Image: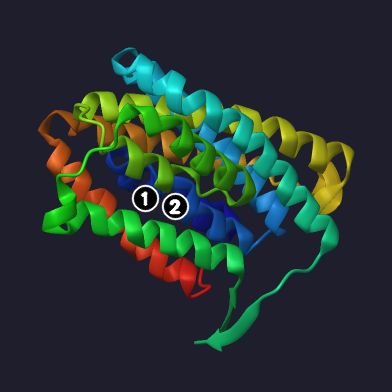
Amino acid sequence: MEYIAIPAAAFIASVLSFYSGFGLGTLLMPVLALFFPLPAAIAATAVVHGSNNLFKIMLVGLKADRDLVLKFGLPAIAAAAAGAWALHAFTALSGGASFSYVLLGKTAVITPLKLLLALLMLGFAAMDIHPALKAVKFDRKYLPVGGLLSGFFGGLSGHQGALRSAFLVKTDVTPEAFVATNAVIGFMVDCARLGIYAYTIFLLGDAGGAAGFPAGVAAVSVAASVAGVVIGLKFLHKVTISLIQAITAAMLGAIAVFLGAGLI
């Protein structure tokens, strides 16, 4: 069953995330977590996410904004490593404050981290749709702060793309540069956290060690996500930055609601 459900989710999420710059990891990780322990699910998602971004770079990477990559991406790398270590620490503690309830047979778990992320996402979503806030642009001097925030939460929970896109869409870039810059920075963060995941899973034994890592499912899902990139690229020339803002706001809001409710 996992060889059907997970690659299908990877393909759909890849198409949806091509323009928004996020969503692949957010949508794919919960599906993986239905079949595998959470640390293994997050690590496998990072493999698919990294491969997806690498393929995007091969196709449109030359259009990335170098200034955004350096000012946003470098702080994100360091923060992603810290976030990945925090995930290992939380795994080792096997606890933390939470509230759970059952909805339609599924147990939903709400944690302080999920609530914090949900509030951040809702705030950025409002900035993309509210008339008084939609025209607001982020000064590039604040890019390192955005990099630190998105990188840390990316390493901790895999939700790096949402905050990254919320910042980058406000920096006056073209749709092509937005997609390319997102891919380059996302790949940089993925490389940083994959190194930590490899150490904590394969050497420290999180989630059952190497035997618990779903390598086969990850490989098939990588192929499915690459197919999604091909579909997205086909229509990139028809997309405007205003449409990207609308897609980003819709996905931010939807993910925030599900995350805050403990459903993902």
Residue at the spot x=59%, y=40% of the render? 46
In the depicted structure, whether residue 207 falls above or below residue 225: below
21 left or right of 214 in image: left
| Label 1 with label 2: CB-CB less than 8 Å | yes
Give the quarter of the image for residue 204: top right
Does residue 245 appear in the picture of this structure? yes
204 left or right of 64 in image: right
SS class, disc 1? helix
Residue at the spot x=47%, y=37% of the render? 145
Q: Which residue is identified by label 1?
A: 12
Give the quarter of the image for residue 201: top right
Q: Quadrant of the N terminus?
A: bottom right
Q: Which residue is identified by label 2?
A: 8
Tell me where residue 153 appears, x and y as whole percent.
56, 48
Q: Nearer the viewer, residue 204 or 153?
A: 153
Tell me where residue 137 appears, x and y as whole percent.
23, 38
Q: Nearer the viewer, residue 130 or 155?
A: 130
